[in-house]
Image (cartoon, helix red, strand yellow):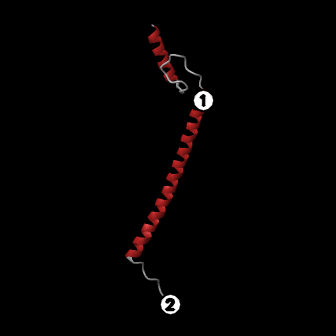
């Protein structure tokens, strides 16, 4: 005979607890990954906001009598729209 006893088989309750522990550790890992992504995105958003604020300070003043607010950064499409509006008023 063997001098050591065989360990008892785990009960269904112990198996369920171990399964839940593995699931929780997986969720913690997934959450930490998601949190890192959110932090990275917030950093990008803050950087872009800082760039827009810096660009707004350096933008020239709009022409007097313009309906557009002064110091608002524009993209090329907005410049085209503004040119069409000016052309429409003058013509």
Give the camera-side residue of 27 and 19. Answer: 27
Q: Nearer the viewer, mark 1 or mark 2?
A: 1
In the picture as drawn, the residue positioned furthest to the top comes out as 91
User: How crowded is the residue under tag 2: few (<14 C-alpha within 10 Å), some, or many (20+)?
Assistant: few
Residue farthest front in this picture = 65
Residue at image coords 59%, 35%: 51
Q: On residue 29, which mark appears?
A: none
Residues 85 and 22: in front is 85
Residue in the image at 51% along x and 52% along y: 35
Q: Position of residue 2 (x, y in %)?
A: 50, 90
Q: Quadrant of residue 63?
A: top right
Q: Residue sitting at 42 percent across and 71 percent down?
A: 17
SS assignment at label 2: loop
Picture layout, residue 55 above or below residue 17: above
Tell which circle, 1 or 2, labels the residue nearer the N-terminal end. Answer: 2
Residue 7 position within the rendered picture, expressed as x and y whole percent measured from the top left: 46, 83
Specify whether 55 is left or right of 88. right
User: Could you classify mark 1 by the number of other residues whose Cα lies within 10 Å: few (under 14), some (14-19), or many (20 or more)?
Assistant: few
Taking depth in this image into account, of 37 and 15 the one nearest to the observer is 37
Q: Residue beneath label 2, please?
A: 2
Q: Quadrant of the C terminus?
A: top left
The picture places residue 23, in percent across and down from the top left corner, at 44, 63
**Camera-side residue: 82 or 70?**
70
**Where is residue 79 shown, x and y percent of the image?**
51, 20
Give the spatial CA distance, label 1 vs label 2.
85 Å
**In the rendered view, would you say 89 is above or below 49?**
above
Give SS at disc 1.
Answer: helix
Q: Which residue lies under the disc numbered 1?
A: 57
Using the image, determine if residue 59 lies above or below residue 7.
Answer: above
| Contact (Cβ within 8 Å) of mark 1 with mark 2 | no
């Amino acid at each position: 005979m063997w001098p050591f006893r065989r360990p008892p088989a785990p009960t269904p309750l112990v198996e369920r607890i171990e399964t839940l522990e593995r699931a929780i550790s997986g969720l913690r890992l997934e959450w930490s990954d998601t949190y890192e992504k959110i932090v990275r995105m917030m950093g990008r958003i803050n950087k872009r906001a800082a760039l827009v604020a810096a660009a707004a300070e350096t933008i020239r003043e709009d022409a007097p009598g313009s309906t557009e607010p002064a110091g608002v950064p524009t993209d090329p499409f907005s410049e085209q729209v503004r040119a069409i509006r000016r052309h429409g008023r003058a013509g």
